[in-house]
Image: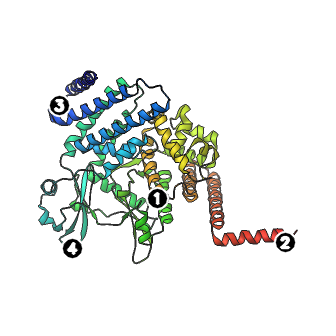
Amino acid sequence: MARRALKLASLAAAASGIYLYGNKFLDPNDFGVVRVGRAIATTAVITYDYLTSLRSVPYGSEEYDFLKSQVHLRSAERLRELCCANRGTFIKVGQHLGALDYLLPEEYTRTLKVLHSQAPQSTRQEIEQVIREDLGKEIKELFVSFEDTPLGAASLAQVHKAVLQDGTTVAVKIQHPKVQAQSSKDILLMEVLLLVVKQIFPDFEFMWLVEEAKKNLPLELDFLNEGRNAEKVAHMLKNFDFLKVPRIYWELSTRRVLLMEFMEGGQVNDRAYMERNGINVNEISRNLGKLYSEMIFVNGFVHCDPHPGNVLVKKCPASGKAHIILLDHGLYQVLSESFRMDYCRLWQALIKADMKRVQKYSRRLGAGDLYPLFACMLTARSWESVNRGIDRSPVSASEDVEIRSNAAAYLPQITQLLNNVPRQMLLLLKTNDLLRGIESALHTRASASSFLNMSRCCVRAVSMYQRSKSHSLYRRAQISLTEALSLWQINLYELFLWLKGSQLGNWVIALLSWMHHSTY
């Protein structure tokens, strides 16, 4: 057994060496021997575990399922240890996998979630070096005070609280100094290892993960791009008075240093914090749904990293209103018009339980014959619930367990789907899962109001698109009238649900019932 593991590790090492040697743009010597060796060894051990542990057990038996779960757990723990040791890009990719709650086996997502709280920290000397190189001054020349302990540390950067010379309190985001140099090499290493694993397990379809990292990591490492995203989304959603986005101080910002307005609050999944501070949990969940429905369906410009550390809530002392503070604007997905329209119509079909249209638009988005699985992945509901109507009943505990179990059972089909759908869909699936995690923590999952907000945005988005394509004044007026009627129906249904759940509604229903019986 040990000989086979060694042989596999040698194969991976050889393939890595050949691939890197043939790439004239990269010097293999830039890879630390320990760093590369650790990644190869971990991949070899995980591969060997899957090859041998399940070989002599009947497929589909209880023993097989139990052993597979154990292999998943061991492999996830090894992967977590690799990410923590190699840091940077490895932690970023591990965090991405940990966010795919309803798409990957629970053993992986549960184990890798901790990477959000185990990100590395740069030393004071490293921080001073980055600021000196990028801003040309020492910390003491720029700030009256600068807290050594970061407010938070992530895979690519960390944030410190500081006070400018004029007394303004700011948040300073500083990139880890080695991340820029290591990122492209780390992605290449991952690509080689995944190619080797795919040769051994042909059903292993995770190249999409490397492709996404290649595309998105350079954008996330450019803090000027993050600043532009922040200003764009603040302007785009300026009608939402509950949304706060930190102001950017451009004169003290570079590609590796971002100076922002300091904002603080409780994490959006902290129900206890909200109850202590008199913040309405349902209102926060409803407003968060409004934000993301507007971004996805109407604007096609989507903040794709809404994990709880990036979404804060705070009650304004002056107005008493609860604000949502949106942080970390490095990762956005821009949706093409055709994709956005298909996605809108698919969600409209899912909400109405129109299975013909669910099939039609799922296929248009690349799901093919796997459209039932695709619908379940999007909604995180069982196929039975999708057929019945996802707004008809909340998610039960048994249904949630079923969905998570299916993530393990249908892993080959799920990875095939992820390889087939448009690249724009991948970050949306991650975003959906992160938002569901927040709703689950707040106990507001699958509430009727969230589907009503989505319906409104879908109606508006489709109507705007149809008007833009129409050259007839009469046709545009017809589209606007249809839009107004559809929105009126949604508002009427929302009023009905409110009456049904309120004390006033109970009195009205009791009165109508008494009047009905008194006539006989």
Decide if residue 45 is in sight here. Answer: yes
Q: Secondary structure at mark 2?
A: helix
Image x and y of residue 214, in percent: 31, 39
- Are the residues at dot 1 and dot 3 in contact (C-beta closer than 8 Å)? no
Q: Secondary structure at mark 1?
A: helix
Image x and y of residue 328, in percent: 33, 56
Image x and y of residue 163, in percent: 21, 69
- The 10 Å Cα crowd at callout 1, few under 14, some 14 to 19, many 20 or more, is some
Nearer-N-terminus badge (2/3): 3
| Pointer 1 residue | 291
Q: Nearer the viewer, mark 1 or mark 2?
A: 2
Q: Residue at x 51, y 61 (%)?
A: 286
| Pointer 4 residue | 167
Q: Nearer the viewer, mark 4 or mark 2?
A: 2
Q: Secondary structure at mark 4?
A: loop
Nearer-N-terminus badge (1/3): 3
Q: Quadrant of residue 358?
A: top right
| Pointer 2 residue | 518
Image x and y of residue 122, in percent: 18, 53
Q: Secondary structure at mark 3?
A: helix
For the residue pair 272 and 478, the one nearer the viewer reads as 272
Instruction: Please give left or right for residue 78 compared with residue 354 in the image.
Output: left
Q: What's the mark number on residue 28?
A: 3
For the residue pair 95 and 55, the one nearer the viewer reads as 55
